[in-house]
Amino acid sequence: MRNGYPLVRSAIVSTLALLALSGCGAMTGDGALDVGYEPSDAMKLVVAADGIDRSEAAVIAWAYFGSRISGCGFTGEPESNDKHWVTPVYFGYAGVPIEPIFIDKQTGAVTWRDTTITLAQLEKDVAHW
């Protein structure tokens, strides 16, 4: 991750958790993240060439959740597990835990349930969000 953005992850996780407790929809009407980042701008903070760190994994998980899972709920803090970051996923108003998101530490590829997509595909999804 480019230097200067270490607080982005905490802001995203905190905002999504707060929104999950107060109601569904982490997005504003125009698709902008409530912390002031457009999803495509947040994804620009991810630099896979040097591997994926915890902050980048948090951004990737948030983007995947919003574009492929739901606008109702939030993602938790990524935890290291061998070759992947494992990110808890909480669904709905109550934040019910569901299957975690796995993010490859080298490539940024995302796996959830039985589907894997590349980081490039996620960037395309988010560009249309």
Image (cartoon, rainbow, N blue to C red):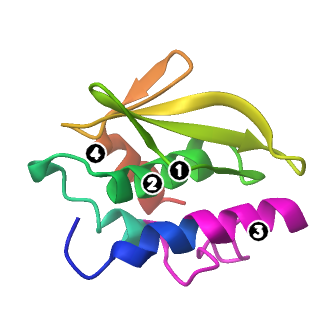
The stretch in magenta equals 13-39
Q: Amino acid at mark 2?
A: Ala
Is 24 placed above or below 84 here? below
Q: Which tag, 2 or 4, sits closer to the chain's start? A: 2
Residue in front for this viewpoint, 127 or 52: 52
Evaluate whether residue 24 shows in this view: no
Query: Circle 2 sits on which residue?
Result: 58
Query: Circle 4 sits on which residue?
Result: 120
Task: Point out the frontmost of discs 1 and 4.
Answer: 1
Q: Which tag, 1 or 4, sits closer to the chain's start? A: 1
Task: Point out the frontmost of discs 4 and 3.
Answer: 3
Residue 10 in percent (x, y) is at: 51, 69
- At x 72%, y 54%, the residue is 71
The circle on residue 21 is none
Task: Point out the frontmost of discs 2 and 1.
Answer: 1
Is disc 1 in contact with disc 3, using a CB cutoff of under 8 Å? no
Distance between the Cα atoms at labels 1 and 4?
22 Å
Query: Circle 3 sits on which residue?
Result: 18
Is 72 placed above or below 32 here? above
The magenta stretch spans residue 31: yes
Evaluate whether residue 6 shows in this view: yes
Which quadrant holds the N terminus?
bottom left
Query: Circle 1 sits on which residue?
Result: 77
Residue 80 in percent (x, y) is at: 37, 36
